[in-house]
Amino acid sequence: MRIVVLGAGTIGSWIADLMCRNRHSVTVVDRDPETVRRLNNELDVRALCGSASESAVLFQADILGCDLCLSVTGDDEVNIVAASMAKAMGARRTVARVYGRVFRDLSTFDYQEHFKIDRLLSLEHLSAIEFLRGIRTPGSAVMENFARGALEVQEIVCTEATRSMGHPLKSLELPRGSRIGTIQRDGKMWIAGANDAIAAGDRITVIGSRENIDEAKSKFQAKPDVRRSVVIAGGGETGLHLARMLEGHRFHVSLMETDKERCEYLSRLLEHTTVIFADATRRVVLEEERVSSCDVFVACTGDDENNIMACVEAGELGTPQLMAIVQRPDYANVVNKLGINLAISPRNVMARQVLGFLNNGPIVTRKQIPGGSIAIVEIEVLAGAEATEHVLANLKLPPQCLIAAVMSSDYVRVPTADDRLSPGDTVVALVEDGAVDAMLELFHANGR
């Protein structure tokens, strides 16, 4: 594939190296002549010196018709403009990295839709999602990034007998816009059908919006999750994203930050989080805040050494679950020996996202669900595709496929049988590996 990387900082250079190792044709653009010289000498790439937001530079980088353009400079505005220009000039797919929370906030303006960018990626938001997966009950998963945060896919274990057990799914009154995605029983996983019935001990995925997914889960769990306490060290964007995800979902959340003005800002944004002006790397502070009684301690201060130190102190005080952001790969062995349960590397998080974009045809991303042969795929609905000609109930989808969500310019929701797809929509579907090609026939332009 032909890939263009705009920006050769830490993330951009690492992505370029990753793409080279996967045998792709890579062009890199950066403003720094020394960085360009180094990349040309060290990597099998074509590195150019220039501004990522200048059309002449993009033209020189052969942006016309490239398969994937990744805009990862250190400036959010430049990334958005450059990715938008790349799309307009002919790049098949464009991705822009953003740091500011405002660019992912759909309540006031949809930057992704307005600038015609295929994906806005926030490393901080993605890292927070990784932490959330580890904090939730064992085996749970929340894949909010599939629907820009509006859709959740959670995995739960049906441990208690409820009135929903033993009845076909079609007879259950699930909240509007929610559904059961997969069922796992006795080591086998399959996509749930209308006639399937849930049994105690089954592991199921529940799909729905943040507003109704807890109600849907209650149909299959007699007792709510035990309320747990989480202490977050570091009030940067990762800490902020994580606190927003946790508050209101049966978690007591405390967030510690060393910058007073930042604390005041966080207090205005987080209604149900206790924001504390304190240094989480000091043992006396952790003792005063009774970190020993919390269930989970997450360190995301922006400094690897401080994160590791804070986790070690919290662990010695008795916190059972320790998590940290650790950027340096050579620290991987150290964190395991120090008892840190989960270490998140933003570079690895980005790698999984980028590799998911390396698909041909209408597939935008594809990720495998652990424990089975079922993938979650994000599909672009192309003009002229057979999928646009009928309502969902009349589409000739393979039985091993379930359309879980539809995203268009003005909504993200779980569809009903009477919904109809339009060109430009994005579909999130669950599909067994062997049925992917058959499903894609419906989404290719003039695919009949």
Image (spheres, rainbow, N blue to C red):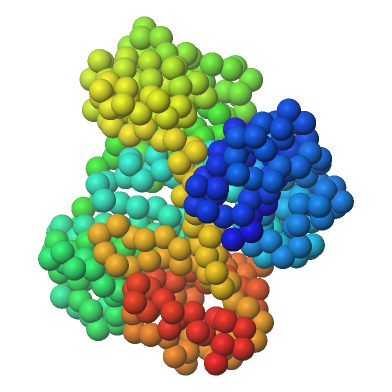
Q: Is residue 345 above or below residue 287?
A: below
| Towards the viewer: 60 or 445 | 60
Is residue 351 left or right of 105 when viewed as pictured?
Answer: left
Residue 46 at x, y = what percent?
Answer: 69, 46
> Which residue is pictured at 47% across the width and 29% down the height?
327
Residue 225 at x, y = what percent?
Answer: 26, 47
Q: Quadrant of residue 169?
A: bottom left
Q: Quadrant of residue 420?
A: bottom right
> Which residue is pictured at 65% across the width and 86% down the height?
384
Residue 374 at x, y = what percent?
Answer: 33, 68
Is residue 346 left or right of 167 when viewed as pictured?
Answer: right
> Which residue is pictured at 55% across the width and 81% down the height?
443
Image quarter where the N terminus lies is: bottom right
Is residue 205 left or right of 285 when viewed as pictured?
Answer: left
Q: Is residue 244 visible?
A: no
Q: Is residue 126 above or below residue 416?
A: above
Residue 3 at x, y = what percent?
Answer: 64, 55
> Which residue is pictured at 76% across the width and 52% down the height?
61
Is residue 161 left or right of 384 when viewed as pictured?
Answer: left
Q: Is residue 230 above or below residue 54?
A: above
Q: Is residue 236 visible?
A: yes
